[in-house]
Image (spheres, grey):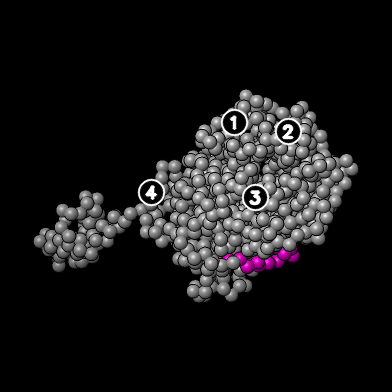
Amino acid sequence: MHLLQVPRATHVIYRDVARNISVTIANTHSPAKICHNQEMQFLSKFFFTLIAVILLPILMVSAQIPTVNPGENLVIEEIPPIPASLTETVDRYTQFRSAGLASWHPTRREMLISTRFADTPQVHLVKFPLGTRQQLTFFPERVGGGTFQPTAGEYFVFSKDIGGNEFNQNYRYELATGEMTLLTDGKSKNSRGVWSNRGDRMIYTSTRRTGKDNDFYIIDPRNIKSDRLLAEVTGGGWGGLDWSPNDSQLLVLEYISANESYLWLVDTQSGEKKLVTPKGRKDKVAYYGGVFSKDGKGLYVITDSDFEFTRLAYLDLATSQYTYLTTNIPWDVEDFDLSHDGKHIAFVTNEDGASVLHLLETATGKEKSLPKLPIGQLFSINWHRNSQDLGFTLVSAKTTADVYSLNITNNKIERWTQSETGGLNTSNFPEAQTVRWQSFDGKTISGFLYRPPAKFPGKRPIIVDIHGGPESQFRPSFLGRNNYYLNELGVAILFPNVRGSSGYGKTFLTLDNGYRREDSVKDIGALLDWIATQPDLDKDRILVTGGSYGGYMSLAVAIKYSDRIRASIDIVGISNFVTFLERTESYRRDLRRVEYGDERDPKMREFLLKISPVNNASSIKKPLFVIHGQNDPRVPLNEAEQIVATVKKNQVPVWYLMAKDEGHGFSKKKNIDYQFYATVMFMKEFLLK
């Protein structure tokens, strides 16, 4: 290659290298042998030529390797350039789509769904099973579904935020014209609301009065001037559930914590509130939804009253007496919907992580047999007004989320959407295996293990992925991009449900509250012990990760068990419980204090500071990757910034990725993709090498 073809920067590199070699030779040989100028010039030319022939092509290729542009909204630190070739390798694993049921049309057998064709999920209309998905909204931000006006269906109401800040605004969308009208103030946090039976009003919650209290507002969506404050409340845990049959009352939930909530009735004219479920019980009771019976004399509710798990119950409003309908099922009832004629209740139970659909006759209390569905998760069960078609979203290990309907008169299941899976044969994707281990105090902890295919011999490296919440639960589902780690890298993935997880009874749910916070971290320590006993898992190649509360857990494990892991990834995680509680949005602050403890109490503040990862970060000795959204209202960005700055002092690799246009987790495909590429690079560098 001619020297004139070499870029100036590369030429300088050659020149400096040649000079260094010449100097080295001169310094290591006798001056008597090679001291005069002609010999030195000859050697310099010789080595310069040698380097040009051998090194230049390598440098030129390196300089020309195309890389991924992270985009103007991403801030990166210490993440090396990502070669474009990586995107080609993983591309098919980034092309999964999914779809979710949003709302049935009230008079036609059509539905609104949420799915993504471009960068973010939007509202689409589907007019028949496997029909065209007609996109209706086109925003750069995700749109969280929509609900049809419930009598004529000429328009629907949808909500969206900006940049993941969760300050949702409501809009009316006219189907005939595509015209959209803002219904809320454009500033506060608003729920989408609950339709009246006549379809002339919606009641929704908004923080516009104080910024932290979820007051109730009422509006006719066709007349934005009708919007008015209906009832003032205190706290951010309030939400509407259902209108009474005559539209005179609204059933309301007051959420205090995962173990404590109350039901109220609100007069839809005066806003007067009446408590339905008594306060002051020694044993806290939780409610997880409710609707009026068709005669208006009672409520169907989900509650854990007098039981370890949540049950479906009928509450007589006149006598305050409960009739429990699912006591024979020793698992949580997690969702239900009453048919419009009041004759059937469809409900879903969480049975050791798998969703099971049930159908109950309200007149007899007996279950009707249903066709068997794949093992997976069921969401958004919703009756059509014909009281025959039950719509739902189904996802399993081998199928991404899609929308289906079940006709209860003939038990026929129809598929409404068939989402793309990047051309991959998902039938080969592994199913989850339930695993259990004993923790430090003898309690049994469980999780779900995905093993890579048999083509990867020997002990496999493993990712321990801890869910958020903390009152959540990992449940077997479609792993999406995570399948790349299994199928292409041969990495096992284990999702633990440590104490404090839901799905295992209300006692288990409380075992990590307050001063018992670190007991859940010890559950992971016991898991590391268990991994060491497994012949096919490599105890010396473990990476721990998690999002939100799982981000805190990944940091805590990196501190407490740094010598037993290779690396950790913290996604929108808590690094200091005190600063988190002081800065999380005001409408949720008191709700989080019930779970974590009140930082305003001196003793609790001392404890929270003691266990906070940022105050123990000197013990993090392994590489760390921190990912966060600038607009996160739940776990503020400061939680990421302070842990990054602190761990850097340990002289260990710290990668940092921040998105200016995201909140509590990434929602835009281009950002999700870059996060995935960077995570693959991180794992290859620090877990697999």
Q: Position of residue 385 (x, y in %)?
A: 68, 45
**How many C-alpha atoms fall within 10 Å of the one at disc 1: few (<14), some, or many (≥20)?**
many
Q: Secondary structure at mark 2?
A: loop
* Of the two numbered discs 3 and 4 in the rendering, the one whose residue sits closer to the viewer: 3
Q: Are marks 2 and 1 in contact (CB under 8 Å)?
A: no
Please give the label number shown on residue 234.
Answer: 2
Q: Amino acid at mark 4?
A: Asn
Q: Position of residue 173 (x, y in %)?
A: 55, 36
Quadrant occupied by the C terminus: bottom left
Near-viewer residue (12 or 527): 527
Seen in the picture, residue 98 relative to 153 is either above or below; the reply is below
Mark 2 to mark 3: distance in Å? 29 Å
Seen in the picture, residue 200 relative to 280 is either above or below; the reply is above
Q: Amino acid at mark 2?
A: Thr
Please give the label number shown on residue 380.
Answer: 3
Name of the residue lying farthest toward the top: 225
Q: Please tell me which residue is depicted at 80% across the width and 56% down the height of the picture.
A: 326
Q: Secondary structure at mark 3?
A: strand
Q: Amino acid at mark 1?
A: Leu
Please give the label number shown on residue 346.
Answer: none
Mark 3 to mark 4: distance in Å? 37 Å
Which residue corresponds to mark 4?
69
In the image, taking residue 395 as reference, residue 48 lies left or right, namely: left
Q: Earlier in the sequence, mark 3 or mark 4?
A: 4
Count of labels shown? 4
Please give the label number shown on residue 183.
Answer: 1
- Segment tinted magenta in the rendering: 432-450
Principal secondary structure, stretch drawn in magenta:
strand
